Image (cartoon, helix red, strand yellow):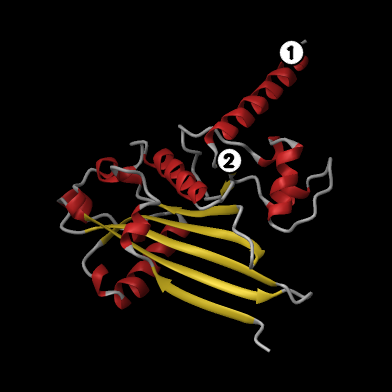
């Protein structure tokens, strides 16, 4: 009996592009003709102990440039002092650019990895994780990170995903984002998230926190619901501050 299935497939460039903000060329300081989009989807299905099939997926999404101006042509993830960004540079150089001719001579400008948390095979993903955001220090401070997180959230919302866990090793969180740290979200949302990934939820405990570490934050892909939860969270913080001040 087969207990696992694995598949790797190349993504249509237009699909990859749809995860990134419209007008990303302006944020990167290049023209649309100088950009290309490359992506791969990794899929895995395996049987749980009870015999039920569980699915996992990961997207590798890259924005690459060609015939760039001199100041961008010299960009390299291999110059980064951040370990995971350096590793993405090695992977691009040693694997993707070797096996995919369309990438020859290109410079990776931005790389994302998005993972779907394990779900029963017959159900859509409800929680996905932006686990990797590899960028160049020279291209920061242009609103790029905020725009990318927002565009990924919109794209996942259109696919039925309700919660985006932004878990990249940020130097600091994107300034335009209203983050929902896991310890501060409401009990109802913690319960829904845990049930969505097949986890056990025990009210009043940090069961959700045990699954999602403190490096990142949640985005509810429905903007109206996200803003409502954010305001509730901030109001609760104000109450705590005022009680402490008194």
The residue lying furthest to the bottom in this view is 1
Give the residue drawn at x 54%, y 66%: 57
Q: Are marks 2 and 1 in contact (CB under 8 Å)?
A: no
Q: Nearer the viewer, residue 32 or 80?
A: 32
> Left or right of 58: which side holds 65?
left
Q: Which secondary structure lies at badge 2?
A: strand
**Quarter of the image with the C terminus in it:** top right
> Left or right of 141: which side holds 46?
right
> Left or right of 96: which side holds 150?
right
User: Residue 67: percent from the left, percent from the top?
Assistant: 15, 57
Tell which circle, 2 or 1, labels the residue nearer the N-terminal end: 2
Give the residue drawn at x 57%, y 29%: 227
Give the residue drawn at x 72%, y 43%: 190
> Left or right of 124: which side holds 205?
right
Q: Nearer the viewer, residue 184 or 6?
A: 6
User: Residue 45: percent from the left, percent from the top?
Assistant: 61, 74
- Name above or below for residue 186 compared with residue 231: below
**Quarter of the image with the N terminus in it:** bottom right
The Cα–Cα distance between marks 2 and 1, rounded to whole angstroms, is: 31 Å
User: Residue 107: percent from the left, percent from the top?
Assistant: 26, 60
Q: Residues within 10 Å of mark 1 (few under 14, many from 20)?
A: few
Q: Provide the residue designation for mark 2.
A: 220
Q: Nearer the viewer, residue 127 or 94?
A: 127
Give the residue drawn at x 23%, y 43%: 29
User: Residue 198: percent from the left, percent from the top?
Assistant: 73, 59
User: Residue 189's quadrant in the figure?
Assistant: top right
Q: Provide the residue designation for mark 1.
A: 245
Q: Which secondary structure lies at badge 1?
A: helix
- Name above or below for residue 45 compared with residue 129: below
Q: Residues within 10 Å of mark 2 (few under 14, many from 20)?
A: many
């Amino acid at each position: 009996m087969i207990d696992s299935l694995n598949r790797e497939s190349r993504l249509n460039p237009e699909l990859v592009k749809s995860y990134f903000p419209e007008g990303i060329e302006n944020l990167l300081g290049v023209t649309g003709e100088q950009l290309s989009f490359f992506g791969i989807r990794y899929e895995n299905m395996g049987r749980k102990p009870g015999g039920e099939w569980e699915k996992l997926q990961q997207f590798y999404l890259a924005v690459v440039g060609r015939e760039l101006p001199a100041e961008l042509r010299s960009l390299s993830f291999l110059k980064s002092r951040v370990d995971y960004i350096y590793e993405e540079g090695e992977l691009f150089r040693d694997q993707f650019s070797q096996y995919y001719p369309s990438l020859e001579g290109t410079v990776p400008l931005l790389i994302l990895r998005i993972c779907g948390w394990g779900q029963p095979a017959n159900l859509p993903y409800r929680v996905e994780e932006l686990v990797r955001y590899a960028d160049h220090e020279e291209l920061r401070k242009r609103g790029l990170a905020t725009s990318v997180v927002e565009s990924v959230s919109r794209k996942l919302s259109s696919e039925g995903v309700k919660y985006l866990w932004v878990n990249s090793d940020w130097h600091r969180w994107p300034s335009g984002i209203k983050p929902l740290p896991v310890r501060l979200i409401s009990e109802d949302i913690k319960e829904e998230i845990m049930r969505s990934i097949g986890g056990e939820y025990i009210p009043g405990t940090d069961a959700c926190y045990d699954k999602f570490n403190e490096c990142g934050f949640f985005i509810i892909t429905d903007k109206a619901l996200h803003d409502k939860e954010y305001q509730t969270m901030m109001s609760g913080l104000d109450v705590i501050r005022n009680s402490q001040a008194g």
